[in-house]
Amino acid sequence: MAVPFFIRTFAAIMSFTTTILQWFRENGRALPWRETKDAYAIWLSEIILQQTRIEQGRPYWERFMKRWPRVEDLARASEDEVLREWQGLGYYSRARNLHKAARQVVEMGGFPQTLEGIKSLKGVGDYTAAAIGSIAFGLPAAVVDGNVYRVLARHYGIDTPINTTEGKHEFTALAQELLPKDEASAYNQGMMDFGAIQCTPQSPRCMICPLQETCVALHEGRVGELPVKQKTLKVKELRLTYIYIRYNGMTAIHRRGKGDIWQGLYEPWLTDEVPFGAILLCQNVKHVLTHRVIYADFWLWEPDEQPALPEDYSWIREEEWDNYGVPRLIEKLLEKLPNK
């Protein structure tokens, strides 16, 4: 639902923005990376705090800054050293990206000072780029994270799901519209803190909120309903092991049954046990379906004697595979077969 025009007048925008700035001056969190304009220190904090609470991430930021006080120092470190220092934070791809990005910065001759330049760094997306750009360089770019979605959805009564393309565009546009160009740093940090301290996911402090008079969700009794997130089906992982039997120019096939994801299509021997003498041709071949991700291992078995087949399997000549419809995954696996 788009924000009604009558609550998006210039005066209303200015009132909202001014309130956030005033609230931040009085209630903003005192954090060490906010006491500097050093892009390295700010960038480091943003990467560490991705998927990490401030209380947990702060000691890591302090250790990194003590051990590698400049980006050049971090760039000279080995990946193993960085990973060891990161140990316990999880999501280790962040540490690897951090290290690669440090080397990118050194190659550039310093931190890029444009949004596109900042986004070119490994592991930096729209939110992180806006945070670094606005705080370190005063770039007029609004941050949009979970806190911002929640504050804007509640205050303006927006029920467009935040995890849809439409929602992302709508909230990003509104956040940018509200941003004071000359105070982007304070405003962005104010929105982050306001969502984390005042307009919290559970038990928000509505009765002492400076925005209560203009908050649509509060007046309509919808605080607990916003923001809206579209329900998504959980993606399941499935692991399969296929054995391609090659015996006297023959191979075994099986037809998938009714109601199956590959109903009516054919596949080699699907099993949980790999026979002695089989050779691994490929491993963890990924195949993505709508609500499932499949990882398949593919083995070649050339027995000395013709084996008995499991129920519902039959023999065909190898050259006849082209006569049978197969799922794309099986097609990819068959491409790995060595020539006879």
Image: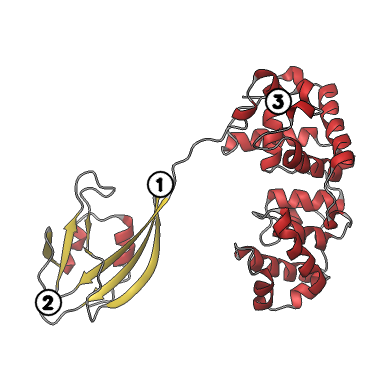
Q: Distance of mark 1 from mark 3, alpha carbons? A: 33 Å
Quick check: 264 above or below 214?
below
Amino acid type of the residue that numbered disc 1 sits on in the rendered structure: His
In primary-sequence order, the first of circles 2 and 1 is 2
Q: Give percent across and percent down for residue 229.
A: 56, 35
The x, y position of residue 254, in whole percent, is 17, 58
Question: Where residue 291 is drawn, which disc sits there?
Answer: 1
Indicate which label's residue lies in the foreground, 2 or 1: 1
Amino acid type of disc 2? Asn
**Which of pointers 1 and 3 lies earlier in the amino acid sequence?**
3
Answer few, some or many: residues within 10 Å of disc 3's Cα (few below 14, many 20 plus, some between 14 and 19): many
Q: Would you say residue 131 is visible in this rendering?
A: yes
Discs 1, 3 touching: Cβ within 8 Å: no
Residue 70 vs 326, above or below: the answer is: below
The span from disc 2 to disc 1 (Cα, nearest Å) is 39 Å
- Residue type for callout 3: Tyr
**Mark number for residue 156?**
3
Q: Which residue is mark 2?
A: 248
Badge 2 vs badge 3, beta-carbon distance below 8 Å: no
Query: In the figure, residue 178 lies in which quadrant?
Result: top right
| Between 8 and 222, the one nearer to me in the picture | 222
Residue at 77% across / 71% down in the picture? 107
Q: Earlier in the sequence, mark 2 or mark 3?
A: 3
Left or right, 128 with reference to 294: right
Residue positioned 71% across, 38% down in the render = 148
Locate the N terminus by quadrant: top right
